[in-house]
Image (tube, rainbow, N blue to C red):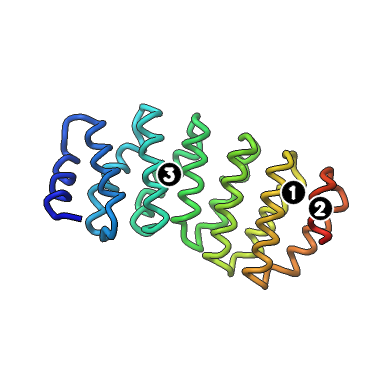
Amino acid sequence: FSRAGYAFLEASLRHKSEMVVYEAAKSICSLPGIEPQELSPAVNVLQIFLSSPKPAVRFAAIKTVSQVAVNHPRMVSKCNEDLEALIADANRSIATLAITTLLKTGSENSVDRLLKQISVFLSEIPDEYKVTIVKSIQRLCLTYPAKHRVLVGFLSNFLREEGGFDFKRSIVNSIVSLMKQVPETTEGSLLHLCEFIEDCEFTMLSTQILH
């Protein structure tokens, strides 16, 4: 990307219009091959927007921050305190994005605390949001395989809770996938899946597990 273009976008972060500032930050975050230090001004602005009183601004900011976290989790980790506050956001889309972003940026030491916060939240949201979080937990297990017992145990607990077919299938698929990618999970995972089969209301899932 051109230096002049970056300089223009960086200067636009100080514009009076909130919309211009957000679009500039979003554009900086999407520049190909951008270095972390060049991202920093945009992330700082987005961090301020995370606590905006306007739901639309909070949603736009968390969506962009979540995308940045895929390639630059360390850069976004400075927003973790603001992200944790958003778990309680009245807008469930914002809260879900906050959780999935924290699952990308959290350290190994923060996993247990984060799971406690998520467990309360999961019981209050529709299944489509739950599926997104299950996939994020699966990725976290690949990042921190040493936490596999805690993470697989957390997922299997929700096999015993209320939930529709798609939610339960996403958990089963995640556990089976982790067994292939993180062999240490196999023994514990098989026990969890056997327990689930005993009381499973979805014949198709039972058949999938048995095969």
Residue at the spot of label 2: 196
Q: Quadrant of residue 9?
A: top left
Residue most extreme to the left = 4
SS type, badge 1: loop
Residue type indicated by callout 2 = Phe
Q: Are marks 2 and 1 in contact (CB under 8 Å)?
A: yes
Above or below for 178 versus 103: below
Q: Is residue 122 left or right of residue 2?
A: right
SS type, badge 3: helix
Residue type indicated by callout 3 = Leu
Kindly identify the residue that appears in the image at 69 percent across and 58 percent down: 153
- Which quadrant, please, contains the N terminus? bottom left
Measure the C-alpha gap from mark 2 to mark 1.
7 Å
SS type, badge 2: helix
Of the pair 81 and 93, the residue shown nearer to us: 93
Q: Tag on residue 159?
A: 1
Label 1 vs label 3, nearer the camera: 1
Of the pair 206 and 133, the residue shown nearer to us: 206
Above or below for 145 versus 194: below
Count all numbered tags in the image, as a single digit.
3
Residue most extreme to the top = 54
